[in-house]
Amino acid sequence: MDLVDVHSHLDDNRFKEDLDEVIERARKAGVKFIITSGVNPSTNRRSLEIMERYSDVVKVSFGVYPIDAIIEKIKDAGEESDLRYVEEFNVDDELRWIEENKDKCVAIGECGLDYKVVEGYNEEQKKVFAKVIELSKKIDKPLVIHSRKAELDAIDIMEEMNCKKVLMHCFNGKKSLIKRCVDLGWSFSVPPVIVRLEHFKMLVKIVPLEQLMTETDAPYLSPVAGEKNESANVSVTIKEIAQIKEMSEEEVAKQIFENAKEMFGL
Ligand SMILES: [Zn+2]
């Protein structure tokens, strides 16, 4: 079975010591492609280095994470204490860098909107998101979308801007929004945490297999609570989808591999 992990963070510090082994285990599990996603200037560049180091299996998407993009404003307001450390950066400069390096990436993301972590920056976030979407259209790359407690706004903006190639990563929105994305022709990537969360089982039930993909968001969203997630675990999601769709794991894996190839041009 050929497998694919369309969203991960291999640059994460938790992979510093064992990335060779993580990649090796993924290869052994049949993972042919891993897309690692940057979220700001430093992680975009680290992700690029990782892609160059494991170029046979790792692909990269360059992102501007919604919270990171407004970190300067959050810091100015003295509200950053609960957030992970992010260096301040200029969004326009980073979008320019991404454009200059467009041939090295397969997608733009992760990007989107996040109203959960900090309140009061929704309009700023939307402005940044619109700029990121503009770039993705200009360089013709799919979008990998993070939308937390902001699903409706994210969908509205992308629909208004006529986005076609969209992957909703770890989507937590309600049923009606899932259906709306399906009707818009967008796709969803499902993390291994599906074994513990009814929400994703419901999502898999109502989304056609042609619009599903497998992701890990590693090191996050592990199938086992408290454990570090890794790309080899996409097999867990395949198994779960096969059960829900009442198909063989081979059939599911084959279709998902095709879906990913089609969207990301792998
Ligand atoms: Zn992620």
Image (tube, grey):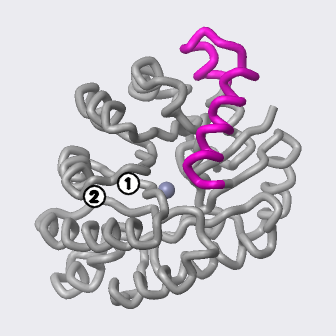
Viewer-nearest residue: 191 or 51 = 51
Query: Which label was assigned to residue 57?
Result: none
Is-magenta flag for residue 247? yes
Viewer-nearest residue: 56 or 84 = 56
Q: Residue furthest top?
A: 246
The residue located at (48%, 81%) in the rendering is 99
Quadrant for residue 184, please give it.
top left
Q: Which residue is mark 2?
A: 114
Query: Height in image: 78 above or below 179?
Result: below
Query: Height in image: 225 above or below 139?
Result: above
**Residue 84 appears in the figure:** yes
Query: Height in image: 76 above or below 254?
Result: below
Magenta residues (range): 239-265
* Amino acid at pointer 1: His
Q: Which residue is mark 1?
A: 146
Prevailing secondary structure of the magenta residues: helix
Quadrant for residue 113, please give it.
bottom left
Q: Assess mark 1: CB under 8 A from ligand 1?
A: yes
